[in-house]
Every structure is written in structure tokens, then in C-alpha cells.
Image (spheres, rainbow, N blue to C red):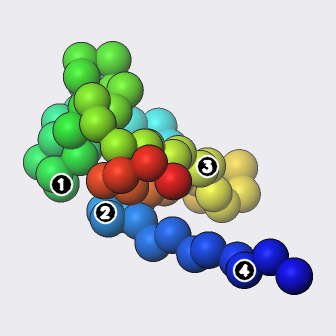
Amino acid sequence: MTKLTTHFATITLTLPYDMDAGTENLALLASGIPVDSLGNAKSGFLFVRTTGNWEDRSNTFRWFASRV
């Protein structure tokens, strides 16, 4: 049987779904996630997941400092 590997995110950040892109990038940078002007990770791996129902949506960003 193969051994399962678990990866824990270096930084996890939850932001409102309807936040504009500029403010979202500033929040990602302020939290320590290295992103470029388009919101792409400069290093590591950035995973984004939309959660919640249509009335209360949010984006959860998980950044892994090294490759997963």
C-alpha cells in the first residue's frame, strides 16, 4: 500500500468573493503571499477555492511555499 503524504498550507487566507482584484492582490501581499500584479504566485503554489452558498460566498487562498 502506498504511503499518503499530507501537505499543510504555509498561509491560508479567506476573503470575500466579491472583492475587486486590486484589493485582493493587496490583501494577498499583506498576508505574505508573493503574487504578481495579475494575482499569480511568484513562487510556490497558490490554490484558490470558492466556498459558501450563493448568499455568503468567499474565496479561500492556500499558499504552499514549496511545490506540492
Q: How far separated are the C-alphas under marks 4 and 1?
A: 33 Å
Question: Residue at point 58% right, 75% down?
Answer: 6
User: Picture coordinates of residue 51 (x, y %)?
Assistant: 63, 57
Residue 66 to residue 26: above or below: below
Mark nearer the viewer, 4 or 2: 4
Mark 2–mark 1 CB contact (< 8 Å): yes
Q: Name the residue under label 2.
A: 11
Q: What amino acid type is highlighted by mark number 1?
A: Ser
**For the residue marked with disc 2, what is the amino acid?**
Ile
Counting residues from the start of the chain, the first of labels 2 and 1 encountered is 2
Label 2 environment density (alpha carbons within 10 Å; few <14, some 14–19, many ≥20): some
Q: Earlier in the sequence, mark 1 or mark 3?
A: 1
Q: What residue type is labelled 4?
A: Lys
**Residue 23 or 68: which is nearer the viewer?**
68
Q: Can residue 6 be seen in this view?
A: yes
Give the mark nearer the N terminus: 4 vs 2. Answer: 4
Quarter of the rendering containing residue 28: top left
Label 3 secondary element:
strand
- CB of mark 2 within 8 Å of CB of mark 3? no
**Residue named by callout 3:** 50
Within 10 Å of disc 3 (Cα), the crowding (few <14, some 14-19, many 20+) is some
Label 4 residue SS: loop
Is 43 rendered above or below residue 14?
Answer: above
Nearer-N-terminus badge (3/4): 4
Q: Earlier in the sequence, mark 2 or mark 3?
A: 2
**Residue marked by disc 1:** 31
